[in-house]
């Protein structure tokens, strides 16, 4: 049997980092996805491949301690996949040899939540291969557990987004669809970063300046609420303006970079109504909202040699195909 599942990356329109401190956020999944093909093997090994990278594990079952993977060859690149496989085996209390092949349209470490996408797609394809089509709620919960194990700290935002898709207004323990399609330009600064390090950096700022920090986080919370109204009423000008304010507040949290600031300002000069860094910052991508002029802005940014594409709203995790072998 062969199963292919896919899950989307996402961008944060408002509220990254502040969500870690109890504020809401708004994110949108994009039409770039990660696909995971899971196929049963004749032996008892787990082999994970992506391009020319691979990891190879043996399944270990210890009574009372559950199922784990013992690496014969481990590529740290697959750390989310490895933990996702263990979670699924233990959740379904079943394990056998499997080959996983990963293909992704999402750039790595670029703030587009590629780790959540690969985690969620792995959980969906492997559980289906083991004979269970999990509910979205179960996929999102297991996905969040994987992020917590690998990163130490994470909000539920990225795994919920990869699972449900769309434009969601999220709080720490709930989410609601805002049901509007949006086109956003996504510009890659080509600076790689680690979400974990950025989350730690923000926590250190909070320890140093607790009162100032609280004011910035509160202000981001207000931006998110007004941004939600702007999205619901289709107020483009207000949406752009609030994105600009959100970028300024993220910069004051110390997560922007000179390159991100440069791209943000170039996009505005070229006609975007709003632009901001998206995700953890420290590099990664900028989003720009340029209704009407998006193709013109896109072409001009391309000439500046930053990778750029026009994204629209993508759907959540799905089983792409399921072939029963002979
Ligand atoms: C990272 O994609 C978004 C952050 O808010 C961290 C999180 O929510 O886990 C920076």
Image (cartoon, rainbow, N blue to C red):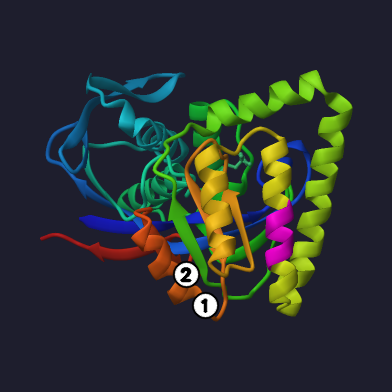
Residue under label 2: 297
At a point 78% along the width and 20% down the height, the residue shown is 207
Q: Which residues are magenta?
A: 240-245
User: Does 48 sit above or below residue 130?
Assistant: above
User: Does 326 sit above or below residue 90?
Assistant: below
Quadrant assignment, res 176:
bottom right
Task: Say whether marks 2 and 1 touch (CB < 8 Å).
Answer: yes
Percent position of residue 312, x then y: 48, 70
Quadrant assignment, res 31:
bottom left
Percent position of residue 279, x then y: 57, 45
Percent position of residue 297, x then y: 47, 69
User: Does 18 sit above or below residue 162?
Assistant: above
Quadrant assignment, res 224:
bottom right
- The disc label shown at residue 293, or none: 1
Q: Is residue 209 magenta?
A: no
Disc 2 versus disc 1: distance between alpha carbons? 6 Å
CA neighbours of label 1 inside 10 A, class few (<14), some (14 to 19), many (20+): few
CA neighbours of label 2 inside 10 A, class few (<14), some (14 to 19), many (20+): many
Q: Is residue 71 left or right of residue 167?
A: left
Percent position of residue 141, x then y: 57, 44
Q: Nearer the viewer, residue 52 or 61?
A: 52
At a point 82% along the width and 23% down the height, the residue shown is 209
At a point 54% along the width and 61% down the height, the residue shown is 267
């Amino acid at each position: 049997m062969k199963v292919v599942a896919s899950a989307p990356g996402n961008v944060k329109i408002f509220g990254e980092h502040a969500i870690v401190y109890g504020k809401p956020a708004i994110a949108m999944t994009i039409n770039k996805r990660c696909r995971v093909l899971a196929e049963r093997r004749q032996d008892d090994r787990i082999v994970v491949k992506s391009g020319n990278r691979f990891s190879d594990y043996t399944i270990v079952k210890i009574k009372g301690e559950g199922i784990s993977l013992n690496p014969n060859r481990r590529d740290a690149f697959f750390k989310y996949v490895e933990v996702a496989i263990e979670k699924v085996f233990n959740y379904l209390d079943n394990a056998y040899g499997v080959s996983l092949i990963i293909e992704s349209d999402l750039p790595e470490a670029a703030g587009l939540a590629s780790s959540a996408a690969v985690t969620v797609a792995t959980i969906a394809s492997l559980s289906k291969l083991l004979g269970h089509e999990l509910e979205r709620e179960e996929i999102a919960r297991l996905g969040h557990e994987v992020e917590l194990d690998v990163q130490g700290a994470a909000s539920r935002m990225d795994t919920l987004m990869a699972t449900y898709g769309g434009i969601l207004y999220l709080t720490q323990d709930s989410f609601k669809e805002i049901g509007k399609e949006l086109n956003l330009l996504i510009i890659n600064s080509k600076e790689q970063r680690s979400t974990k390090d950025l989350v730690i950096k923000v926590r250190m700022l909070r320890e140093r300046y607790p009162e100032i920090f609280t004011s910035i986080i509160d202000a981001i919370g207000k931006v998110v609420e007004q941004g939600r109204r702007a999205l619901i009423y289709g107020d483009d000008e207000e949406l752009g303006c609030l994105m600009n304010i959100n970028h300024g507040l993220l910069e004051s949290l110390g997560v922007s970079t000179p390159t991100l600031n440069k791209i943000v300002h170039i996009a505005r000069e070229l006609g975007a109504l709003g632009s901001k860094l998206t995700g953890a910052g420290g590099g990664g991508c900028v989003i720009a909202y340029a209704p009407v002029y998006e193709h013109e802005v896109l072409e001009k940014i391309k000439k500046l040699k930053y990778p750029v594409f026009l994204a629209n709203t993508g759907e959540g995790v799905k089983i792409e195909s399921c072939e029963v072998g002979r």
